[in-house]
Image: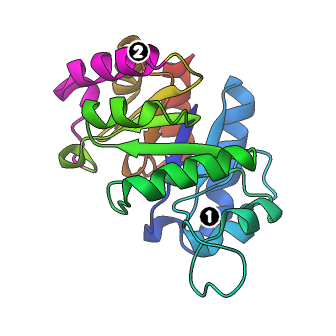
Amino acid sequence: MFIINCKNYEEVAGEKIVKFVKTAERISKKYKIKIAIAPPQHLIGVVVKSSIPILAQHVDDSKVGSTTGFVIPELLKKSKVSGSLINHSEHRITSKEIAQLVSKLKELKMISVLCVKDVTEVKKYAKLNPEYIAIEPPELIGSGKAVSKEKPELITKAAEAVKSAKNNTKLLCGAGIVSGEDVSKAIELGSKGILVASGIIKAKDWDKIMSEFAKSMV
């Protein structure tokens, strides 16, 4: 799995998100790998009919109805959104909310990508059986220093922790990934995919960098 979190970067503002998603669709088809995009929340509706999975960047543990400003899982489902990131380091939530949301997305047959900062959290949350756990040390996010190079033992220990949970959860690696070499190393260390943001979004040539990452995965 190759997930690109667009955050709220200006590079994909407005209609530029359409070009970005079409590039991802093309690369996904060419290399036969699963690519998912998490666009800025307000742009989800612009690209939701894409041939690749579209994810929300955040979802709330709240109900359908009188809940102004909240992102509701059931309504995302009705809008053909495939799933959501949960507990990203830039939008952390409580343990109770995490458990409720993983359960809710599972019930709705949606993709859950639970973000954690260390191996302790991997062990804590793997038992919830989210579809993916993405380990991202906060200090390396957006740094250009890949966790696969700076802290390789973090990935191997996280992979062991996920495996020991004996469920279907798959490990993703994030933080500081900027090259195909970073991607290859993460896979070699036990990751089943990557979660990236600025390393792709801020590249001058989206096609070139996505292709580099995709080739490194296969």
- How far across and how far down the image is residue 205, in percent? 49, 47
Q: Disc 2 or disc 1, which is closer to the eye?
A: 2
Residue 169 in the image: above or below residue 140:
above
Residue type at mark 2 is: Gly
Span shown in magenta: 143-165
Q: Tell me the CA gap for discs 2 and 1.
A: 31 Å
Q: In the figure, is residue 152 to the left or right of 184?
A: left
> Please, which residue is most extreme toward the top here?
188
The three-letter code of the residue at mark 1 reads: Ile
Residue at the spot x=59%, y=71% of the render?
Answer: 62
Determine the secondary structure under disc 1. Answer: helix
Q: Which residue is mark 1?
A: 17
- Residue under pointer 2: 190
Residue 202 in sight here: no
Residue 150 covered by magenta stretch: yes
Q: Earlier along the polypeptide chain: callout 2 or callout 1?
A: 1
- Residue at figure coordinates x 54%, y 73% from the top left: 13
